[in-house]
Image (cartoon, helix red, strand yellow):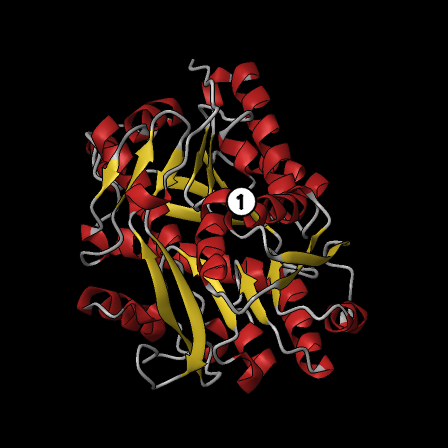
Amino acid sequence: MVAVLAAALLGTAACAQAPAPTIKLALVEGLSGSFANAGEAVHRNIAWAVERVNARGGVKLPGGARKLELLRLDSKGNTEEALSMFRAAVDQGAGFVLQGNSSATAAALLDAVNKHNQREPQRQALFLNYSAVDPALTNEKCSFWHFRFDAHADMRLAALMDVLAADRGVHRVYLIGQDYSFGQHVVRKSREMLAARRPDIEVVGQELHPLGRIKDFLPYAAKMKAAGAQAVVTGNWGNDLTLLIRAAREAGLDAKFYTFYGNALGAPAAIGDAGVGKVLAVAEWHPNVGTPSSDAFYASFRQRFPQPADDYVHARMQAMVELLVQSMQKAGSAEPAKVARAMEGAAYDGRSLGGFHAGRMRAADHQFIQPLYVSQMQRAGGDGARFDNEGSGYGFKTMRYLTPEATEQPTSCRMTRP
């Protein structure tokens, strides 16, 4: 009898000491294939954000603190595989799905999440989007179950076009993009914005190329040079951007590049000195913002990931995880529907990142409203470019800063809430 009682007490103690179940976040991203470098860069960012949350005790909920767990699910850069990985994520108990590299994939995932949540209300999921920037995702395709943490394409493009329009020396522009929803939108919208801001500018060429399949961009660069392009506007990302810029350098193209993502993933090193003063990028933050809190944030990331090739950090991905945790704690729950309601309209003050990069989640369409910076490539160490990118010797200097309010655009979203 004593032995039985002792065993029962030991069992009770073991149950009492059992750790609380983790809250699973599923990263569904291309971690192999043509854009593996972009996928791995995302994983580093989100893994670091998760590590910081867990280091301070996890998510504080009424039943006790719970740690975050990040699942790596490789979509291989393929939409059908991403849908398969979403199903695997739900089967593993993930209530939060994270994706961003490809707006086409994001649109397919959003449709799958909507249908899944309607079909299986007992195990719903939220879709957190960190870089799929097709405006439709928070306009006509907006959903209660989707939150976007990147500025959408029109917000980014408006900032770039304001800078381009102010350059009175530019009269001939070439447009090039990847042939899918996002790339098509950037090319089309660039033409519209240029016509509105600078009707004297001539679009001397327009190209759409297959996504992730072009290995030699020299023929494209030769066309740009032959057309006399003084500026190139592109939404290309990953290797499609790096190879394009490298080809432009090899072809001797003397033009400015107005890019969404020209400040990382090998692009600065690929173009070298030819890009100084010529390559521009737009983002919610960059390492040379120059405030003490920004410098401390960047130094912390570089300490965690000291290899130059790993130097690709985004404030928006950190804010995404922090706002998710804030919303869970406000809701007192990790249930996706309750978290979504807490996140709608929520303000993030940046305090958990050291006091910078504040923003708010607009309730009307679930678009995160945050600052934007247009920056220009410089040799590192010079005025405004203290830090370089990826050990390349080149950094980016702020040319234009937009407050969160200045980036905001109207939405056509007509959201249906459960």
Give the residue drawn at x 54%, y 79%: 275
Furthest-right residue in this view: 219
Work out whether 16 lies above or below 321.
Answer: above
The answer to whether residue 10 is left or right of residue 235 is left
Work out whether 308 lies above or below 19.
Answer: below
Residue 85 appears in the figure? no
Q: Position of residue 202 (x, y in %)?
A: 66, 57
**Number of dots carrying numbers:** 1
Residue 9 quadrant: top left
Give the residue drawn at x 68%, y 77%: 253
In-front residue for pair 11/256? 256
Residue bearing mark 1: 196
Q: Position of residue 396 (x, y in %)?
A: 41, 73
Q: Position of residue 113 (x, y in %)?
A: 55, 27
Furthest-front residue in this view: 200
Give the residue drawn at x 34%, y 31%: 362
The answer to whether residue 237 is left or right of residue 10 is right
Q: Position of residue 301 (x, y in %)?
A: 33, 68
Give the residue drawn at x 27%, y 65%: 297
The answer to whether residue 300 is left or right of residue 220 is left
* Secondary structure type for disc 1: helix
Residue 3 quadrant: top left
> Of the residues shown, which amino acid type is indicated by label 1?
Ala
Work out whether 220 lies above or below 56.
Answer: below
Residue 251 appears in the figure? yes
In-front residue for pair 320/261? 261
> Which quadrant: the C terminus?
top left
Please rate how many residues cluster around mark 1, counting C-alpha atoms within 10 Å: few if below 14, some from 14 to 19, many from 20. few
> Which quadrant: the N terminus?
top left
The answer to whether residue 117 is left or right of residue 313 is right
